[in-house]
Image (tube, grey):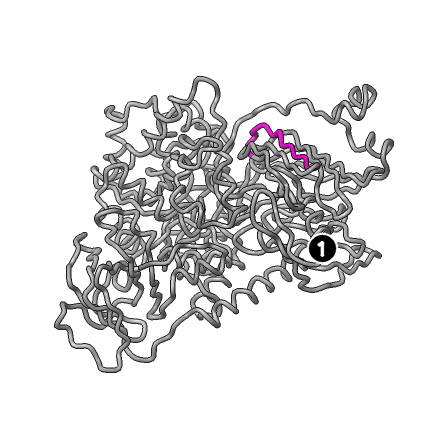
Amino acid sequence: MCLCAAHRHSLFFGLPRPENVHRCGAGELPMPRRDWLKLAGAGAAALGGFPSRVAAALYGKPVRYEFVSSGVVKGSQTTVSLPDGALDVRFEFIDRGRGPKTHSRITFDKRGFITSLTTTGYSYYKMSVDERFTAGKGKAVWRNAAEREDRIATEPRYYVSIDGSPEELAALARALLRAGGPVPLWPAGEATIKRVRSISVSSGSLTKSVTLYEIAGLDFTASTVWLAPDGSLFMSGSQWGAVVPAGWHAVLPQLFAAQDQRAADNGKLIAATLPQRVGSAIAIEGCALFDAEAGTLVPNASVLLKGDRVVAVGDGSLPVPSDARRIPGAGKTLLPGLWNMHTHMDVSFGPRLLAEGITTVRDPGNEPNYISKMQKQFESGELVGPRILIAGLLDGTGKYTAPIGITTATQAEAAEHVREWKRHGAVQVKLYSSLDPAIVPAIVKEARVQGMRVSGHIPAGMLAQDAIEAGFDEIQHVNFLFLNFMPDIKNRTQTPVRLTAPVERAGTIDLNSAEVRSFLALMKERDIVSDPTVTIFHQSAYQRPRDLASSGFGEIADWLPPQVRRGLLAGSFPVPPGKDAAYRASGDAFLKMIAMMHETGIRIVAGTDDVLVGFDTVRELELYAKAGLTPAAALQTATIVPARVMKLDDTLGSLKPGKIADAIIVHGNPLEDISQLRRVGTTIKGGVLYDARALYATAGVKAPPLA
């Protein structure tokens, strides 16, 4: 999940889904008047929006759920069963000034399939929601943020809502259990269900047996839902955000632990089947070799790997042991394993990241115990995934605090929390937006003592130039560079304004001005590294609803599971009337800033903040090339430059004798066309080989075969 710019989730069924596509939106759109007011009548309308007490009077007792994020109740869901079997559901939560508020009315047929659905309100990003579906008489019709569809219904299909509530996942689970087999979905694909386990949970004097189910077909990996014995929803979500019946949130850690164990068990199956461990040497012969340090391509090269190391690099005459595994390299390019310097890891991300060619990541914000455990699991080979560098997140307290990481309110606390992150294996600390600027010096001082880098958002009340003077080594996100020239809002950048203002105003800033050039000169003088995650902001400026190409992922859209593909069509920020050109100008300005930093000699490291895990690093590099960097320079931002920044270039970042054997074999030449990086055939991490297409297949990704 994004901790830095916006949620990185599609809100299928209303819950954070960390594997899905990013839509970085914000704003303050009013919630439209709801059709269900007509149903309730004038009396209910007078009471204001059909509150739960009116629902109880008309239909029966409502069931109230709490929305809990990192142990804090931040919202609710209220479900009312109507006399005809329909459901009336109200769902809302607040997260750092964002969050949805929706009302749904859903009717079902005897199979439990949806026959009509209406959801109104606003989404997590405050975008207006008006989603409608009807099915009957051989026809299905639906309208939502991504689609306007009228289909002939030759068979019953279950409609998957885009802006619905968690209640809908339980409704789908019940339909799947009743069907006893696969259920086809609108608009495409099918879902299946598997019972995982039942456990007993207690709250006070009450005890329940609840059952964990997995639903496949909605995302890259199976969606989990807990049902009570009567089939009603008990819990859905994760520590990032979950709904559970009111009064029962104390059992969430027990349920999360069971979910985490299931994810680990699934991951172990992949780790037992896909890695190819070669006892002898590996020789990649006759390839084009990308020399990351020089930024050049070496033709007709051969590279010999043994164990977890590169042992020799040469030309076609390089001696190869007779028992070596030989890999022909004609028409292929051999590159060092790629880095993603900004991803908030989930264990399910591992195979997809390796499939993209990512062998090293930096995680700048996660739950301490979770990320340190995952780091060890990937290192040992228990699970499949890249090597992880941990950057521990520190934030202040208040309504806009990050939903994960560690909060701190005093200088003494801050110093101890830096040490705590060090004990968890962090090599860096990342400061977040609600942190009190007065605490920053204490964090910087203790980080220096611990040998840790300092990076982050720019805390509210500071500008980027202030953070540099305070001792930052690195700035995350290109928006904070633009906010340096918007001092009128510097005291509000812990709010969504840090997202909206740059998209609205970046195009109005004169990037050739003395002020901007002086700032960039300061970054260069202090060797301030930029982790721009420009894909997020370029997408926010350019993406439009139902325009697949504007998402930036049109090339690979058809590889994706059908329900994931839908997310690419939903758009990003709502563009106010008459502002289309201004938003596009801001998108262009984000890229120009990348070009200017590169020209100034500022070190750029490629990171994505999980726009579309397994595909977004290539998109980030495509945008660097679009900004004017050569493909070689763009590739360096994901190879040798991050290795040098993290002081690991003696072992990683390039393919030289003695370095760790992290490499990718690309079927094509990404130095001619950076998009050729989507043709990774083999990923090698620490001398272990992986078929990239087989890795993608574990997540339901149907990448085309490579010649």
Up/down of 430 relative to 302, above or below? above
Drawn side of residue 80 relative to residue 454, left or right: right
Up/down of 237 relative to 534, above or below? below
Q: Point out residue 169 in the picture as x, y percentages from the top left corner.
A: 67, 47
Amino acid type of the residue that numbered disc 1 sits on in the rendered structure:
Ala
Drawn side of residue 392 relative to residue 106, left or right: left
Up/down of 582 relative to 621, above or below? above
Residue pictured at 26% horizontal, 78% vertical:
324
Q: Which residues are magenta?
A: 125-136
Q: Point out residue 319 in the picture as x, y percentages from the top left corner.
A: 16, 77
Q: Is residue 317 magenta?
A: no
480 vs 361, nearest the viewer: 361
Image quadrant assignment for residue 186: top right
Q: Is residue 481 visible?
A: yes
Drawn side of residue 25 relative to residue 229, left or right: left
Residue under circle 1? 179
The C terminus lies in which quarter of the figure? bottom left
Farthest-out residue, bottom: 322
Up/down of 256 relative to 164, above or below? below
Farthest-out residue, top: 578
328 vs 400, nearest the viewer: 328
Magenta region, mostly helix, strand or loop? strand
Q: Residues within 10 Å of mark 1 (few under 14, many from 20)?
A: some
363 vs 542, nearest the viewer: 542
